[in-house]
Amino acid sequence: MTPSSPVLPEAAEAVLPTPGRLTDAVLEDVVTWRRRVDAASRRPVLAYVLSGVVWLVVGTGFALLASFKLDEPDWLGQTAALTFGRVRPAHLAAMVYGWLSMVDIGIMIWLWGRLLKTEVRHTGVLLASCALWNVGMVIGIIGLLAGASTGVEWVEMPVASFVCIVPALGLVAFSMLASLRRRRVQHLYISVWYLGACMLWTPILLVAVLLPIYSGVPHATVNWWFAHNILGLWLTPIGLASAYYFIPKVVGRPVYSYHLSYLGFWTLALFYNWAGVHHLVGGPAPQWLVTVSITFSVMMIIPVLVVAVNHHMTAFSRIRRVVYSPTLRFVVFGAMSYTAVSLQGALMPFRSLMEVTHFTHYTIAHSHLGMYAFGTMIAFGSVYYILPRVTGWEWASRRLIALHFWTTGLGIGMYVVGMTIGGVIEGRMMNDASIPFLDIVAATKPWLWSRSVAGVLMTVGHLTFAYLVWQIVRHRGPAPTGPVYFRTPPAGVFGQGDGGPVDSSALL
Amino acid sequence: MLTRPALLFLGAFAAILMSFTALALVPKLQLTAIEPTPGTEELFGAQVRGREIYIREGCIYCHTQQVRPPGYGGDIARGWGPRGSLPGDYVYDRPHLLGTMRTGPDLRDIASRQPSSAWHYAHFYNPRSVSPGSIMPPFPWLFTTVEVGPGGAPADAVALPPGFAPPGRAVIPTEEAEALVAYLMTLKLEPLADPTATE
């Protein structure tokens, strides 16, 4: 397999008559349109990213509460609003719909302008959508703590909050369509496909699951069709779009095989949305339905391997750069986690494995590998790239970025390993009917403690990140002299070598 | 090279429409004809209220309501039900409460396994009063307390081991605790005369 024709995220074609060496004049041109596009998206990007970070901190608080409550069940046990069964859905809602959805929309808006080489249109509409979304989140979180859960996993927030969120998504789509119509590129880069498609899928998903027409077992199938797809068709496409943009960007090499990326997109679009019902293996759902879901889950190996080849082969060509670039380090961590979580997901649904792992903490480990090690880490990396460009300032401290990386990286590693082992132990004991249930509880306790410790580590990382974001947005600290790296790269590592715009921090 | 976004949107729309039809609409149509299994009845009164409290307190995050079939896992051997769950057991469930986690045991047949409301009251007030080592949260807001007079605790006081009730006070279930127990008592799985009949 040979790498196809060089396609960088923003192919130089529209600027250069023929792709070739960058002259000073062309470079200035590139710098100018990028600055203009970045400036246009500044306010909505900041609004969404800052909102996301606030919900990250809120969701982290709920996570710690929920985790410690399984260790010490009587801690804060007198307060109804803080009981495990209310804090846990509040954690999920704050993280999925608050943090990851909102920061991803911020990233998406910025990428959209860059990839279409045009200013983002209707920024006022985008700001209104952000406000509306936040209103929905506040209603949702307060509703959950007050006990107004709908009882449907992944859409627990009261319907009123989705009555805000779905129209907010519509407003974002409206602005993105307007920008799309005024694009200044011929070719639509692969990231545009993922972003465009997920903006179509997500409102459909939400409306479909909220329809009040289901009960009993069909309600369970539509529930898990939805829950799996909110990761697969909403957060995954944005994560992959980001990785497809930032890896080639920072590495300064085209995507390894651009043709493969078409295959990756369409196989994801066709296979992923069938996979969710494997959550009902061994339950009362019709067997054919579960079998279909297992089949498609396994077929997900194709898009996963395609994306893995493309991301990893592109990154590994200059993998040394993870030593220096925070963006690349976080994004490569996320891309590798995507490969891991998806291969695990493709093998997990087999009935014989599910017999042990279903209903246990193993599943929780798997979902955090997806939502956090993949989705959240790529979002962190993207924010490290985007914020200097929309704020015109630099990150306050390379040491704090390093602290953020290591606490979250080690934290999620410890989380996933501990809960996976604990889950397998739990599942094996559960299938042996001679073991009393409370012995199983006792056996999982040490692993639940390890989760709490991991959670504390990740909390340190999140607070550090929130502090850094606040500093850069407020233009705190000494005026920046250049991009912040983990350590100073030798001359020539980032710059304009190899005939292409390399690290665009050089082009800021 | 893809230059026409309309193609992309059409393809993406077709993809999601197919899976929604197959995984959501077809099961809905296929299962609307399903008869409720014997013993599956519509809830009423306090049972409905109890189910709302079950949802409100998030019981679903640690308890499933589905018994695995024979030969798959150890549910039946554990005494969690006489048979595997069937679609007909859930025809009146809205929303469904099948659950995905067993941090605590399955509850689909809890009424057969633990029919004592006294046990459930003590367990809700503080699970460790009857299940030492349990990590279930306490639900004291489903109870009130009254001062224990010279005549002793009232007749409806929850029987708790020493040290669990507030000193000098008796714990009385509220309507909410009663409703929750009323709901749990509906979670009963009847064996089928011919287990293959509704397969």
Image: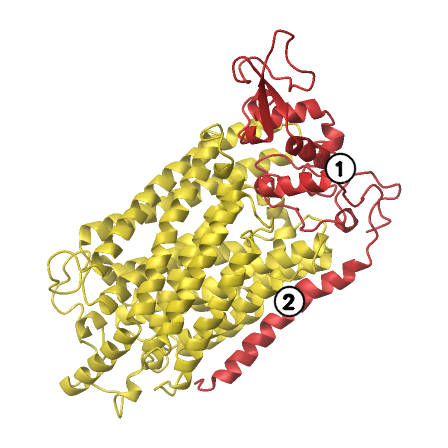
Tell me the colour chain A is drawn in: yellow
Asked if residue A103 lies left or right of residue A28, the reply is right
Residue in view at x 29 percent, y 76 percent:
A40
Q: CA–CA distance between discs 1 and 2? A: 32 Å
What x and y, as percent, mark residue A461?
Answer: 30, 47
Q: How many marks?
A: 2
Asked if residue A337 lies left or right of residue A316, the reply is right
Label 1 secondary element: loop
What x and y, as percent, mark residue A75?
Answer: 45, 29
A120 in relation to B127, above or below: below
Residue in view at x 23 percent, y 87 percent:
A20
**Residue assigned mark 2:** B20
Quadrant into which the N terminus of chain B falls = bottom left
Q: Earlier in the sequence, mark 1 or mark 2?
A: 2
Look at label 1 and name its amino acid: Thr
Please name which of the two marks, 1 or 2, marks the residue nearer to the observer.
1
Snapshot quadrant of residue A256: bottom left
Residue in view at x 81 percent, y 55 percent:
B34
Asked if residue A8 lies left or right of residue A366, the reply is left
Tell me the colour chain B is drawn in: red
- The answer to whether one can see residue A25 in this image is yes
The mark found on residue B186 in the picture is: 1
Q: Residues within 10 Å of mark 2 (few under 14, many from 20)?
A: many
